Image: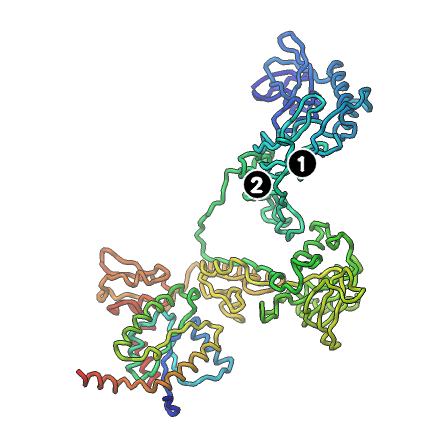
């Protein structure tokens, strides 16, 4: 520990701390221009000069690069210091008269104009032509020392000093991390000019790619736990071993880049599967134009667009940035369709009506819903549908054939045209709109196959997990102790998912609460006298319920584990293994019986 | 030559979880199929001992159906894989007996495949009509007499 005095106050700091850091820790103000807490100090701007008395001698030092030493006396606001800073401010104002950080710092020191003329300078075109670069070197330091890439550096001396890449050419080694652009206090650096590789944004998955995200991000506003995650595929630390700015600055010390995914094992008595669903990929129906025509959005993209926490704070814009005057909602995209999903996805009619209402309310646009049947089955749903009709939302009953941007009449110019059959009027209609929402259906999640095998479940024809009984046991599965809840069992909306969740939880808790289990009455057993110890039964059992007893030289069935499938019995060559209530002799009798 | 007066007897070993429930669904769906199949319900297709099949054929059945859950969907995880393994060996045994392979079928019928169950019974019945009665007693007498 080092003891020093700053402005008459005794301060104790760790060895290696700079005088600037010591002053700031004590709440004493020293102005800086080229200093940043995440970067190594550079001492370029000299604004942080202070007078230091040591061993009887007083000199001026840049406090950012001066290590605190025992017995130092530091004065941060003497007349000499202030005069020096003011001259510096005037010089900087002369070089960069429009630079905001400079103007701000100069004003703080009471300097509003400079007596010096603007010097001749030469700026690299890579950093912008306005000449606002103050040569603080933060971009160079962050690129070289923190990000460990080294695409930027200083070039030239005196008035010709500037920041640039080797040979002033777009850099091949630039990682397009954007650090230089984000740390530059004057906005002189533009990422797109520095780099040769095409800057690729990271699409934000939760916002359906409508906006981009950083490598460290909060997955969605309601995430539990509400902590950010780091994407190792795009995080700079994993590419160059540099950066770690987030870890260094986290006051709670909550970030640790050296950690990796852990696989933990838990022994549990019951499991509730609530693994959700995926959304139908609208690209499978190319004639609706998704991915090809602009302003055709899926329901889930539109949900983010009109959501208050979304990328536009809930304002509805076309991709050209104007408010739509007309909008079409296409129901049953991918659902009720022999070519895709035959089932009805249950939630789409209601969310389509919701969108229609929101669009009407927010933009006053002409809204048309193209539907096959209106499925408004729940509490208040039908009343909501009627309300929309009173709000002058148009409803056309008919499947949409295509969405096109090829106009056939003058009013279709520059618009999307929804071509559909109006079954109530008996006509084919072309409805021009500014925007189309495709009400995509629900489909089983991508991990359904894997979960199916892991938990030995079955799936219904539609691909969702099969419940034990569609009416009498909708949350149970044939495997005891494994329950289903929510959309993984079939498309459903929020009230139904919540109800199912409660039911599954009750089922799971009921098992745990009982304290005892009921054994299968049809379990297998092995007659020791007949058993020859061949262990075919051991290999046959899917539940590892049969084990070989070395001492006795015979195999034994664990009745708590035995599920009563009888596979071991069928494989037994001596007939030692039998299944209660399904013994060989019983089955022979049955066969005789059915053939008599 | 298909014999229209001949009604084959098929013994079906159905697993409780998939194929028996599938057969039940065929019934509740009122699907029409020949009444040639007599069911023996087991917990799993893996319970089917090849001796059951031979017992059935020797006892007067003209054909045997073994039906279980689809591979990967067995209620007991792997029971149907065991059935799948035993089946080719059983076929070799039938060859040795001089019994036509078409008489014993292994099918995967899930609980929702009522129509498939009905179709399998229709097809088997058709084929057995073409093959004619098994006539186990007659064949054994013939082979034993040949020795």
Instruction: Give the secondary structure at mark 2.
Output: loop
Where does residue B99 sit, x and y in percent of width and height?
29, 80
Regarding residue A145, the answer to whether it shows in the image is yes
Q: Position of residue A162 (x, y in %)?
A: 68, 27
Left or right: A291, with A544 as reference point: right
Please report, as a chain letter, where disc 2 is located: A
The residue pinned by badge 1 equals A182
Does residue A352 sit above or below B4 in this rendering?
A: above
Label for residue A244? none
Taking the spot 22% from the left edge, 63% from the top edge, the residue there is: A532
Q: Is residue A234 above or below residue A289?
A: above
Residue shown at 62%/24% (left/top)? A41
Q: Quadrant of the C terminus of chain A?
A: bottom left
Q: Nearer the viewer, residue A194 or A566?
A: A194
Residue A556 occupies quadrant: bottom left
The residue indicated by pointer 2 is A235
Please state which of residues A585 and A489 is positioned toward the viewer in this rendering: A489
Front position in the image: B102 or A593: B102
Picture residue at 54% right of the left edge, 36% below the top = A240
User: What residue do we see at 47% from left, 45% from top?
Assistant: A262
């Amino acid at each position: 520990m080092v003891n020093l005095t700053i402005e008459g106050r005794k301060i104790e700091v760790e060895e290696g701390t700079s005088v600037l850091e010591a002053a700031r820790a004590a709440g004493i103000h020293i102005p800086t221009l080229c200093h940043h807490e995440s970067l190594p100090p550079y001492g370029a701007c000299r604004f942080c000069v202070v007078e230091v008395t040591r061993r009887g001698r007083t000199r001026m030092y840049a406090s950012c690069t001066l290590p605190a030493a025992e017995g130092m006396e530091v004065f941060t606001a003497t007349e000499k210091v202030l005069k020096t800073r003011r001259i510096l401010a005037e010089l900087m104002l002369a070089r960069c008269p429009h630079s905001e950080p400079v103007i701000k710092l100069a004003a703080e020191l009471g300097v509003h104009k400079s007596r010096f003329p603007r010097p001749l300078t030469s700026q690299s075109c890579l950093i912008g032509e306005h000449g606002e670069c103050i040569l603080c070197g933060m971009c160079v330091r962050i690129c070289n020392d923190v990000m460990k890439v080294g695409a930027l550096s200083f070039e030239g001396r005196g008035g010709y000093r500037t920041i640039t890449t080797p040979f002033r050419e777009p850099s091949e080694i630039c990682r397009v991390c954007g650090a230089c652009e984000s740390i530059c206090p004057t906005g002189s650096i533009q990422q797109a000019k520095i780099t040769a590789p095409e800057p690729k944004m990271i699409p934000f998955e939760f916002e359906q790619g409508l906006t981009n995200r950083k490598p460290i991000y909060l997955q969605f506003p309601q995430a539990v736990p509400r902590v950010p995650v780091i994407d190792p595929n795009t995080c700079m630390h994993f590419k160059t071993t540099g950066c770690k700015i987030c870890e260094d600055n986290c006051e709670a010390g909550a970030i640790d880049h050296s950690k990796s995914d852990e696989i933990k094992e838990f022994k549990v008595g019951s499991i509730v599967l609530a693994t959700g669903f995926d959304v139908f990929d609208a690209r499978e129906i190319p004639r609706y134009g998704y991915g090809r025509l602009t302003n055709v959005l899926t329901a889930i993209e539109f949900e983010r667009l009109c959501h208050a926490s979304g990328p536009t704070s809930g304002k509805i814009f076309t991709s050209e940035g104007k408010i739509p005057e007309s909008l079409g909602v296409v129901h049953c995209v991918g659902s009720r369709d022999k070519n895709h999903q035959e089932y009805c996805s249950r939630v789409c009619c209601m969310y389509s009506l919701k969108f229609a209402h929101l669009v009407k309310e927010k933009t006053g646009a002409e809204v048309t819903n193209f539907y096959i049947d209106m499925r408004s089955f729940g509490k208040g749903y039908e009343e909501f549908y009627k309300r929309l009709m009173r709000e002058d939302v148009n409803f056309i009953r008919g499947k949409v054939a295509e969405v096109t941007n090829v106009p056939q009449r003058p009013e279709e110019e520059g618009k999307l045209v929804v071509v559909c059959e109006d079954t109530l009027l008996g006509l084919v209609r072309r409805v021009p709109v500014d925007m189309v929402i495709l009400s995509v259906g629900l489909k089983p999640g991508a991990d359904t196959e894997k979960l199916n095998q892991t938990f030995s479940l079955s799936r219904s024809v539609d691909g969702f997990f099969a419940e034990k009984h569609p009416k009498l046991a909708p949350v149970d599965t044939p495997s005891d102790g494994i329950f289903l809840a929510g959309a993984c069992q079939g498309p459903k909306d929020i009230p139904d998912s919540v109800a199912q969740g409660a039911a599954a939880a009750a089922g799971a808790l009921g098992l745990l609460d009982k304290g005892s289990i009921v054994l299968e009455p049809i379990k297998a057993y092995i007659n020791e006298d007949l058993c020859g110890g061949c262990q075919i039964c051991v290999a046959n059992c899917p539940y590892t319920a049969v084990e070989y007893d070395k001492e006795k030289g015979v195999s034994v069935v664990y009745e708590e584990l035995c599920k009563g499938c009888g596979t071991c019995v069928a494989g037994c060559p001596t007939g030692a293994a039998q299944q209660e209530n399904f013994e060989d002799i019983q089955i022979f009798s049955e066969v005789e019986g059915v053939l008599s | 030559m298909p014999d229209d007066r001949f009604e084959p007897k098929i013994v079906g070993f159905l697993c409780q979880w998939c194929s028996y429930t599938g057969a039940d669904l065929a019934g509740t769906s009122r699907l029409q199929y020949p009444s040639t199949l007599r069911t023996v319900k087991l917990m799993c297709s893996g319970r089917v001992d090849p001796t059951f099949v031979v017992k059935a054929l020797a006892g007067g059945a003209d054909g045997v159906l073994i039906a279980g859950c689809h591979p990967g969907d067995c209620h007991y995880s792997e029971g149907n894989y065991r059935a799948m393994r035993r089946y080719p060996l059983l076929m070799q045994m039938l060859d040795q007996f001089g019994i036509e392979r078409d008489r014993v079928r292994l099918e995967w019928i899930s609980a929702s495949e009522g129509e498939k169950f009905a179709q399998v019974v229709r097809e088997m019945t058709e084929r057995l009509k073409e093959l004619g009665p098994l006539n186990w007693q007659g064949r054994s007498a013939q082979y034993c007499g040949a020795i």
